[in-house]
Amino acid sequence: MPETTAARPAAHSPVALLAATPLFAVLPAEELNQLARTTRTRSYQRGEVIFRKDDAGYTLYIVVSGAVKISVSSYEGDEIILAIFTTGQFFGEMALFDEEPRSADAEAIEPTEVLTVQRDDLIQVLERRPRIAIIQLLKVLGQRIRATDELLQDAAFLDIPARLAKRLLDLAEQHGEATPQGVRINLRLTQQDLASMIGARRENVNRALAYYQSRGWLAKSRGYFTIMNQAALRHRALP
Ligand code: CMP
């Protein structure tokens, strides 16, 4: 066996998983090894809560596989989905950095495996390697604030069919896979999930979906949406 193969970490070792994460990929090998020794792997079933809003939190989570929904709910049970994170993405950094309670709920929406990094271990890495903080972390946080700003703008300036079209296109861009029929969104989503992502009632989302399906722009099969006419949805997403 060639030496390089023997020395390479196993595909699912914490080192390999960290190295495959944009946040940590820039770390040199010895730093990755050191950080990997402090991590834990955890598995969650679909529907399992990882943490709740207002919990205390000192842990950063990196998604290894599966998908995690970040959401907040009203006392009446209405939910807003702020984000869905999949392989390579991280969450839980806010409570870790600002030392306030968790800002939202985190729930596995697929069978999910995560890698956890504790606050002190992360801070140590960031102190030794401030470039990660500057280039990787701030970039991602900036992108998330942009996405949230856009949600707010859309809620104020777009009607529900436009918000829905825009969100479907975003989901296709982030979680899409090209198929002969069109771009399939690789997340199992209910009408209620989509409603919670755009701050709308399920009945209104149902109506807009039915219209898009009747026009042949969109199809749903076994819980997965496929966009068949991106241009038409893009046009409908305009203000
Ligand atoms: P934390 O507050 O520790 O726990 C909830 C996590 O959800 C938070 O850290 C972020 O990682 C994530 N989160 C909260 N709000 C948003 C948002 N608007 N966009 C993307 N991710 C978010």
Image (tube, rainbow, N blue to C red):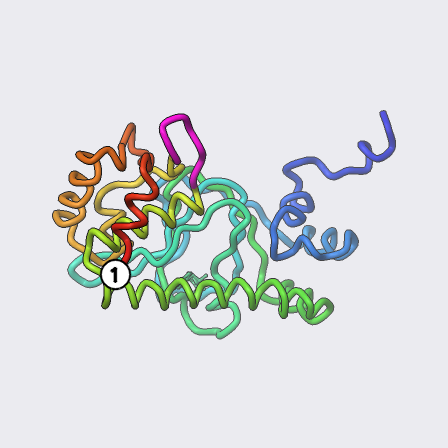
Image coordinates of residue 134 in percent, x first then y, are 63, 70
Check disc 1 and report its element: helix, strand or loop.
loop
Residue 182 is a magenta residue:
yes
* Residue under the point 40% across and 56% down: 51
Residue 91 is a magenta residue:
no
Using the image as rendered, state which of residue 40 and residue 19 is in the foreground: 19
| Quadrant that contains the N terminus | top right
Instruction: Give the extent of the magenta segment.
Output: 176-183
**For mark 1, does the 10 Å Cα neighbourhood hold few (<14), some (14 to 19), or many (20 or more) residues?**
few
Q: Quadrant of residue 100?
A: bottom left
Q: Residue furthest right?
A: 3
Q: What residue would you read off at disc 1?
A: 239
191 relative to 180 in the view: left or right: left
Image coordinates of residue 83 in percent, x first then y, are 38, 55
31 relative to 197 in the view: left or right: right
* Residue under the point 63% across and 37% down: 12
38 relative to 2 in the view: left or right: left
**Mark count:** 1
Compared with 21, 141 (above or below) is below
* Residue under the point 22% across and 51% down: 195
